[in-house]
Image (cartoon, rainbow, N blue to C red):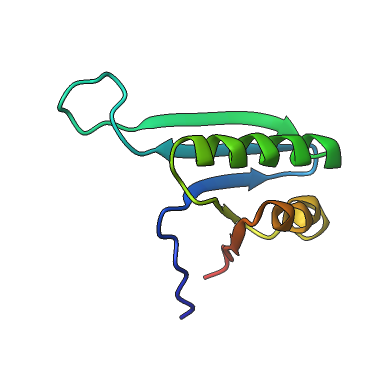
């Protein structure tokens, strides 16, 4: 079992397919200014193209730092060539990537 330190990293999960990437993350902290524990979810779909991936990772990295995270923790299932762009470009943003194998 590999242990991964995700302390103060914004975790973003990507669902990878040939043409698109769907991503989802929950942001810590208060949203409405009340005393309730709340999180804000961000999600979107982008094209599985180099320029779109680079732009999105840059935006997510900037957003994570504006929310007092120290960077990104990217999670995806390896899908061969379909996840290659995401795997390659995450390192430009000091993001840690964890690939999950769906085989049991």
Q: Is residue 74 left or right of residue 29?
A: right
Q: Is residue 83 left or right of residue 15?
A: right
Residue 25: x %, y % from top left = 48, 39
Residue 9: x %, y % from top left = 47, 52
Q: In this rendering, is residue 1 above or below 84?
A: below
Q: Is residue 69 left or right of residue 32?
A: right
Q: Where on the picture, by quarter, is residue 31?
A: top left
Pick the residue in front: 3 or 28: 28
Counting every numbered tag in the picture gives 0
Residue 76: x %, y % from top left = 61, 54
Pick the residue in front: 55 or 42: 55
Q: In this rendering, is residue 102 above or below 55?
A: below
| Extreme residue in the bottom direction | 1
At horizontal 73% and vertical 51% (from top left) the residue drawn is: 86
| Extreme residue in the left direction | 35
Residue 33: x %, y % from top left = 24, 20
Q: In this rendering, is residue 43 above or below 17?
A: above
At horizontal 43% and vertical 42% (from top left) the residue drawn is: 68
| Extreme residue in the top direction | 32
At horizontal 57% and vertical 68% (from top left) the residue drawn is: 103
At horizontal 35% and vertical 39% (from top left) the residue drawn is: 28
């Amino acid at each position: 079992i590999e242990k991964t330190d995700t302390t103060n990293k914004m975790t973003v999960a990507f669902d990878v397919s040939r043409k698109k990437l769907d991503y989802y993350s929950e942001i810590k902290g208060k949203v409405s200014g009340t005393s309730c524990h709340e999180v804000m979810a961000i999600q979107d779909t982008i094209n599985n193209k180099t320029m779109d991936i680079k732009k999105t990772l840059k935006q997510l990295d900037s957003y994570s730092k504006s929310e007092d995270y120290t960077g990104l923790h990217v999670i995806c299932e390896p899908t061969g060539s379909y996840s290659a762009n995401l795997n390659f470009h995450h390192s430009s943003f000091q993001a840690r990537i964890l690939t999950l194998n769906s085989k049991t």
